[in-house]
Amino acid sequence: MDRTEKREFIAHLAAVFADTSFVLVAQNKGLTVADVSDLRRRMRGAGATYKVAKNRLATLALDGTRFQGVKPLLKGPTALAWSTDPVAVAKTAVEFARGNDKFVILGGALGVQTLNLDGIKALAELPSLETLRAQLLGLIQTPATRIAGVLQAPGSQLARVFSAFAKKDEAEAA
C-alpha cells in the first residue's frame, strides 16, 4: 500500500465509524481463507461488514470517533466487524467463534461504551432488531384488539336480548 492508498483507507474507515453504531474487534490468527470467506458471508447475511485492517491504520481511523475505547484491543492480527444493528454482528461473531477456536473475540464498542467479551456475549443473547420490532408491534396491537372486543361485546349482547324478546313475542302471538 502506498501513502495515497493508506490515506484513502483511513478516510474510508473513519467515514464508516462515523455512520455505524457498533464495532467488534476480533483476533483472526490462523484462520484459513475458507474460514474467513465463510465468516464474511455470514456477516454480510446479517447486514454487517468484516474487514482485516492494519492496526496502525485502524488506530488512525479511530481518532476523533466515539469508538476510541477499542484502540487498546488493536494488537496482533486483528479484524474489525461493524454494523448499524449491534445484535446481528455480535450474534454472528459469537456463533462463528463457537465453531472455530482460531477466531477470538477481543471486545468492541457500542457507541462510546467499550465492551469486553462478556459484554459482546450478552449483546448476542438479545433478540434481533427485527424480532424486537415484531414484539413491539404485537404489544401495540394487543390492546387495540381487546378494546375492539370490549366495544363489540355490548352490541352483540343487545342484539341477543332483542332477538330473544322478538322470539318470545312471536311465541306469545302464535
Image (tube, grey):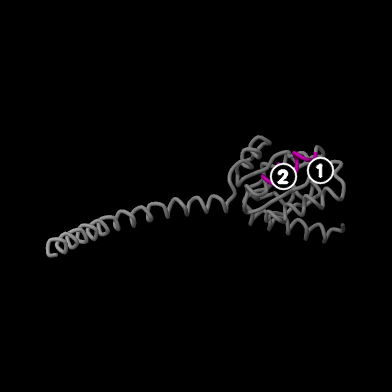
Distance in Å between CA atoms under marks 1 and 2: 11 Å
| Residue sitting at x 16%, y 61% | 171
Side (left or right) of 7 relative to 128: right
Q: Main secondary structure of the magenta part?
A: helix
As for residue 167 lying within the magenta part, the answer is: no
Marks 1 and 2 in Cβ contact (< 8 Å): no
Side (left or right) of 80 relative to 130: right
Please name the residue that numbered disc 2 is placed on: 93
Question: Could you say where residue 130 lies in the image, as x and y percent from the top left?
Answer: 57, 53
12 vs 35: above or below: below
Neighbor class of circle 2 (other Cα within 10 Å; few <14, some 14-19, many 20+) is many
Give the residues in magenta.
91-100
Mark 1 is on which residue type?
Asn
Mark 2 is on which residue type?
Ala
As for residue 92 lying within the magenta part, the answer is: yes
Q: Nearer the viewer, residue 167 or 9?
A: 167
